[in-house]
Amino acid sequence: MNKTKNNDHMRIIGQYAGGHKKLILLGRFLAGISAVITLIPYYLLWKIIKIATEGTNLQEIEPIAWEAVGLTVLSLLVYIAALFCTHIAAFRVQANMRSGLMRRILTLPLGVFDDEGTGRIRRIVNDSTAATETFIAHNLPDKTVAAVTPVGLLVLIFAFNWKIGLICMIPAVIGFLCMMTMMGKGMQEKMAEYQGALETMSSEATEYVRGIPVVKTFGQTVHSFTRFKKTIDDFGKWATDYTIMLRKPMIGFMTCINAIFLFIVLSAYLFIGSGVTPQAVDILNIMYYIIVTPLITVALTKVAYSGEAEMTLIDALDRVKSVMDIEPLSDGEGDKEPQGNSLELKDVTYRYKDGASDAVKNVSARIEQGEHVAFVGPSGSGKTTICELIARFFDVDSGEILIGGVNVQEIPQKKLMEYISFVFQDSRLLKTSIFENVRLSRPDASEAEVMEALKKAQCMDIIEKLPGGIHTVIGEKGIYLSGGERQRIAIARAILKDAPILILDEATAFADPDNEARVQAAFEEMTKGKTMIMIAHRLSTVTNADRIFVMEHGGITEQGRHEELMALNGLYRRLYDEYTRSVEWKVGA
Ligand code: ADP
Ligand code: MG
């Protein structure tokens, strides 16, 4: 990942802000003005104390006091105006960032969402842009305030008695140095590690929760726990190290800041003490320092926070960039249209980014228009990968995939999606009504058409038991569907889409025996006259296929009809016998 340099971030923000850049500048300028105005009442306070101690002209106090109040209100108003400007700009930047990200995400190969983890991308779209918004809206004006205030304070402190001023500055300077050690380059890296750890933890948590059905079914507790647990342990260790690292500078900082009064007393002792009758103006100055020096604390704390916010921002910008830098799918140079619905794989090879070996290797196959084929084979043999390559979740490393004689890479993404319906093994539904969920595949479909699709997908029993029929929102008020039910809704979605090529990846894997018969019936309904690829775990569902491809280690090792493959006495026969035995065992048990 290309790290954003420290002074690069304002340029990047500027790019997202566009014309609103000027508003940011105006906001910062106003914040600076407000900081200066804030300091004037402290000078007026000095004047009031002076008049009070002198005891003459007491009537002058009131107008000065009002002036102080007026200026305080004015500084507040100017600050609000500053925030107003920066907020408008910040919302614009956030909106531009989010739409930029979303536009980018739409062009990305679908496979990215497996590789990168949807949790990570979601966090970036939500949190990193929100962090940028906070930075511009609040931290940028505060940063100006944090820069202006110490300068103004210095002027104030030195203006009255530079010797006392100098002594008061000692703890402030030491405190500042302590703080700087907390801000260095090492800290920037720490901040990135912190965000990284949070992210890993969140995506591991999501994966963990998602994996619970598998964990429960197969009792893979140890494996799944260790990964999740390790990320938490790592985070815990990291947090402890970080805290220990910050302990010394933090103690130094806090001690110095709170020791300021000690130094005022010290300087009072030095300059006024030694038995000589103190001058009224000296007492006045000391009193004044007691009031003003604590402001240094406030100013320094602001500087500290602006530094921290900046680190968060730089990290957020890096994360946004990491998504923007993912290579999009090259969208078909030509806008070719497939000629028919045949499918052809020519010497296709693909390896996942972090894969140790090819997931699919030199696979060639031709599937005719209207043909129903099945891919079977042990888990991990590359069946899902082949289907995902056809739907262009990824682009092949070598070889070609043709639909109707046209390379999928030359078909515009939108067109390709019109040609293919995909029912995934794990069908997810969006948190909206069943009606909208089905209609996703064809947003202009009428209620009657959706109903028809649901009927064909054997979903009527699901609809009937729901309180609001097809307008019931899924995932709300305790309404959830089982895996098999979700599957049938997904099939209805595919039926409504009515695409000429159908890909069903273990679409019956979740179904219980009762559901399976229904799902099977739904398939028959939807596959008439269409080219279909079916990946099946339960071999009973593929015996009728026109052709069965048997996969092993990323390659096709056998192909033919069920009877031919049985006669071959190879892997298919072994798988089939195993399968029948497991069914018998289940029935027997
Ligand atoms: P099947 O569907 O036949 O079970 P897959 O196509 O899912 O097999 O997987 C083929 C191979 O690719 C396996 O070795 C698997 O571990 C690997 N694989 C699958 N998905 C990914 C991924 N997102 N990243 C890395 N490797 C993967
Ligand atoms: Mg699979």
Image: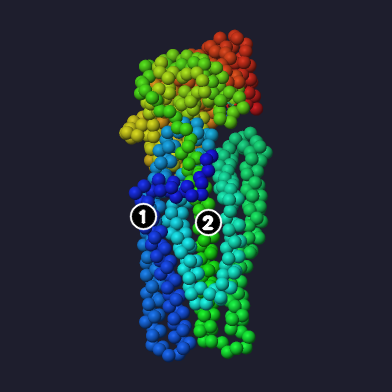
Q: Is residue 545 above or below residue 89?
A: above
Farthest right residue in view = 222
Q: Classify mark 1 as within 8 Å of ligand 1 or not, answering yes or no.
A: no
Q: Which mark is residue 289?
A: none
Farthest front residue in view = 162
Percent position of residue 355, x then y: 59, 28
Residue for point 49% across, 16% down: 346
- Counting residues from the start of the chain, the first of labels 1 and 2 encountered is 1
Q: Is residue 158 visible?
A: yes
The residue pinned by badge 2 equals 307
Q: Quadrant of residue 469?
A: top left
Q: Depth check: give the residue in front, 263 or 209.
A: 263
Residue for point 41% across, 62% down: 31
The C terminus appears in which quarter of the rendering? top right
Q: Is residue 106 above or below residue 408?
A: below
What colour scheme was applied to this rendering of the protein? rainbow
Q: Please state which amino acid type lies under the numbered disc 1.
A: Leu
Residues at marks 1 and 2 touching, judged by CB atoms closer than 8 Å: no
Percent position of residue 473, x then y: 42, 42
Q: Is residue 541 visible?
A: no
Percent position of residue 161, x then y: 52, 77
Percent position of residue 329, x then y: 44, 29
Q: Depth check: give the residue in front, 431 or 167.
A: 167
The residue pinned by badge 1 equals 23
Q: Please state which amino acid type lies under the numbered disc 2.
A: Gly
Q: In 3D space, how far apart are the residues under numbered discs 1 and 2 (Cα atoms)?
A: 22 Å
Q: Is residue 426 above or below residue 60?
A: above
User: Which structural element holds mark 2?
Assistant: helix
User: Which structural element holds mark 1?
Assistant: helix
Residue for point 46% across, 39% down: 324
The N terminus appears in which quarter of the rendering? top right
Residue for point 61% across, 71% down: 259
